[in-house]
């Protein structure tokens, strides 16, 4: 399309001595053309002439100019009231494919985030809790968005913010302290996480149903903040105090020591569990921000701005009156003088700024905190507008599997991330068995172990194909399908293209990098359609970058894979007179497909 725009610009300049950009769009199907432009009608006012006459002149000059361009235009026609329909010639398609062979990345590059520092914060699991399907989803969405920003030239810092202090930790600690004998360093990270998940349910129940337990949990919560502020070295200090203390004082210090030990055991176990999980699913983080590391800064800022009138005192707490801005009131420091989630988020944004001086901070969370985040950012806007204006909050809905109720870690009825991974693994194993059976092959092993590239490709694509914002219906059968809109289907489409190219490469005398200029090669409709689809990739990437929308890439990849399937079924490549030339089309398609998949974090296996 860019080439046609340039050619039209030259034609207009030659004919009328004016510099204008032509609006070029896809032509209506019933015209038999490829592109259409209304440039003649746009020039009517300037030239004060009939648009049909202008269109006829442009058509004649366009054909004349195109003669020196190796047949890039086959035909042009005028349609009332002054449209120009342009049918591309084979030379155009051949030149486009040649460009993709020589400078693939140059032809698709984007610079929306060139040299900009962008912090992408996502996943954000709380220590002392087990990872659920929502964490699996947001981890993969955040990773894909990070990859898109990096592709567009950004310097991405992947950040992870988690609550290692707060009431949820205190509830967990309350139950863990009742079962200290179950705690062991010999446990696997998963076993430790399972124990903490059980403890959270037990502690939450006690907090709601037992007033004495509730009071004890509140006291534990206050101690956790002090322990976190003192750092892990507090354990050694408390051990020294135990040695020097006597009587009731010694007993109190021993309790504090036990709380500190269990607290840091749980924190360390949680992050080890998180790291194993992220490594398994192919997601990395550059920086972890536990709440305890930013809570102090949040308190400092909120107290400072309390004096400046941004925040107000209310019933012993510190609040932000959001009603002034069409929002709602939220507490930033509670009656016990402890920072709430809101104050910690204030501390986080200032800490991020001190660490990286970011150009943009992208925060990806569930849509249940949309209103919450609006209040936090509105409060920051009153005294640090340069930070709130650089912050983009992207939200998503819940992951829903048919028959599963809304998740709640408090009730213990949530769907764990590992459950989803194992479910898809087992389903893929059955698909693999059926495929092997249809080929007359036996399964290599009875162990249900699927290639991680295929397993996580299926899960990633099943998540990413949905537009970020609403709920995600995770259809298990569709996610593992080899024929539908799924990750395995796209991976198979890539593997099939690799096989075609492999057969061509077997002939050492043939080179897949020669220029496509053979006049004897007349392209058919299937070849042209696939090349057209390849050409759309750059514009799709522009939209995906602008909107941070992995789903745009998914939709396009599915469409181009379908286009390749039609090409594959109707066009002989290997062994044809134009084997190498058609192989160039396959290679361009494969480059686009694998590049698009890589932006989604999906790898192509060697075989399927």
Image: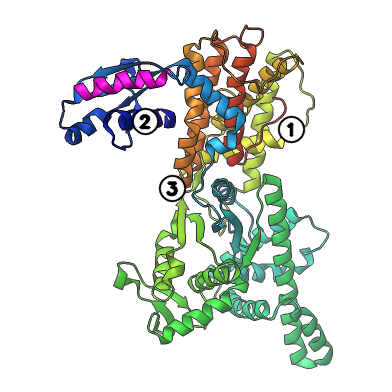
The picture places residue 328, in percent across and down from the top left corner, at 35, 69
The residue that appears at 79% across and 67% down in the rendered structure is 181
Image-based side of 165 in relation to 504, left or right: left
How dense is the environment of label 3, judged by Cα within 10 Å: few (below 14), some, or many (20 and up)?
some
Q: Position of residue 106 (x, y in %)?
A: 56, 38
CB under 8 Å between discs 3 and 1:
no
Q: What secondary structure is found at the residue carrying circle 1? A: loop
Q: Quadrant of residue 452?
A: top right
Percent of width and height locating residue 456: 65, 39
* Crowd around label 2: few <14 · some 14–19 · many ≥20 (10 Å): some
Residue visible at 72% across and 86% down in the picture: 252
Residue 131 rendering spot, x and y as whole percentages? 63, 53
| Residue located beneath label 2 in the image | 10
Name which of mark 3 and mark 1 comes first in the sequence.
Answer: 1
Q: Is residue 55 magenta?
A: yes
For mark 1, what is the residue?
448
Q: Which mark is residue 469?
A: 3
Q: Is residue 302 above or below residue 582?
A: below
Quadrant where the C terminus is found in the figure: top right
Instruction: Give the CA separation, mark 2 to mark 1.
Output: 62 Å
- The quarter of the picture where residue 248 lies is bottom right
Q: Verify whether residue 287 appears in magenta.
A: no
What is the magenta range?
53-67
The N terminus lies in quadrant: top left
Compared with 365, 417 (above or below) is above
Q: Secondary structure at mark 3?
A: loop
Residue 61 lies left or right of residue 80; in this view the side is right
User: Which secondary structure class fits the magenta region best?
Assistant: helix
Instruction: Determine the residue positioned at 82% across, 86% down.
Output: 240
- Circles 2 and 3: CB atoms closer than 8 Å: no
């Amino acid at each position: 399309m860019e080439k046609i725009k340039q050619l039209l610009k030259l034609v207009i300049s030659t004919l009328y001595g004016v510099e204008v950009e032509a609006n070029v769009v896809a032509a209506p199907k019933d015209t038999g053309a490829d592109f259409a432009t209304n440039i003649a009608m746009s020039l009517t006012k300037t030239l004060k002439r009939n648009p049909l006459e202008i269109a006829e002149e442009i058509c004649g000059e366009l054909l004349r100019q195109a003669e020196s361009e190796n047949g890039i235009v086959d035909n042009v026609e005028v349609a009332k009231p002054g449209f120009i329909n342009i049918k591309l010639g084979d030379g155009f398609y051949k030149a486009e494919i040649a460009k993709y062979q020589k400078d693939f990345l140059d032809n698709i590059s984007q610079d929306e985030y060139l040299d900009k520092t962008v912090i992408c914060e996502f996943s954000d699991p709380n220590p002392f809790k087990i990872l659920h399907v929502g964490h699996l989803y947001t981890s993969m969405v955040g990773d894909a968005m990070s990859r898109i920003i990096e592709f567009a030239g950004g310097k991405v810092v992947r950040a992870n913010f988690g609550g290692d202090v707060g009431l949820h930790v205190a509830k967990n600690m309350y139950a863990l302290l009742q079962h200290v004998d179950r705690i062991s360093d010999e446990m696997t990270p998963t076993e430790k996480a399972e124990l903490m998940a059980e403890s959270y349910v037990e502690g939450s129940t006690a907090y709601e149903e037992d007033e004495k337990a509730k009071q004890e949990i509140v006291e534990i919560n206050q101690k956790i903040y002090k322990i976190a502020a003192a750092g892990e070295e507090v354990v050694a200090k408390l051990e020294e105090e135990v040695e020097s203390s006597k009587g009731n004082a010694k007993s109190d210090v021993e309790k504090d020591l036990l709380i500190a030990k269990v607290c840091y055991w749980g924190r360390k176990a949680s992050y080890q569990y998180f790291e194993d999980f992220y490594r398994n699913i192919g997601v990395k983080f550059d920086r972890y921000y536990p709440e305890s590391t930013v809570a102090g800064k949040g308190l400092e800022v909120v107290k400072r701005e309390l004096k400046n009138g941004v925040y107000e005192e209310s019933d012993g707490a510190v609040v932000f009156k959001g009603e002034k801005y069409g929002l709602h009131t939220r507490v930033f420091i509670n009656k016990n003088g402890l920072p709430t989630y809101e104050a910690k988020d204030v501390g986080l944004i200032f800490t991020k700024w001190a660490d990286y001086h970011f150009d943009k901070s992208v925060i990806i969370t569930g849509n249940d905190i949309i209103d919450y985040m609006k209040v936090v950012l509105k409060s920051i806007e009153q005294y640090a507008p340069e930070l709130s204006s650089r912050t983009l909050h992207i939200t998503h809905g819940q992951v829903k599997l048919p028959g599963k109720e809304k998740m709640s870690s408090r009730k213990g009825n949530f769907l764990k991330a590992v459950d989803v991974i194992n479910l898809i693994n087992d389903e893929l194993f059955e698909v693999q068995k059926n495929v092997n059976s249809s080929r007359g092959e036996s399964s290599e092993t009875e162990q249900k172990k699927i290639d991680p590239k295929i397993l996580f490709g299926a899960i990633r694509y099943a998540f990413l194909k949905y537009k970020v914002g609403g709920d995600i219906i995770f259809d298990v059968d569709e996610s593992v399908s080899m024929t539908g809109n799924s990750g395995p289907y796209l991976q198979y489409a890539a593997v099939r293209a690799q096989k075609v190219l492999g057969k061509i490469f077997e002939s050492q005398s043939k080179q897949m990098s020669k220029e496509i200029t053979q006049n004897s090669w007349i392209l058919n409709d299937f070849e042209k359609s696939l090349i057209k689809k390849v050409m759309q990739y750059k514009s799709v990437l522009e939209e995906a970058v602008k909107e941070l929308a992995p789903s745009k890439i998914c939709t396009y990849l599915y469409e181009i894979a379908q286009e390749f399937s039609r090409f594959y079924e109707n066009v002989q490549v290997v062994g044809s007179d134009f084997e190498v030339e058609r192989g160039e089309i396959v290679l361009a398609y494969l480059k686009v497909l694998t590049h698009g998949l890589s932006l989604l974090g999906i790898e192509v296996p060697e075989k399927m």
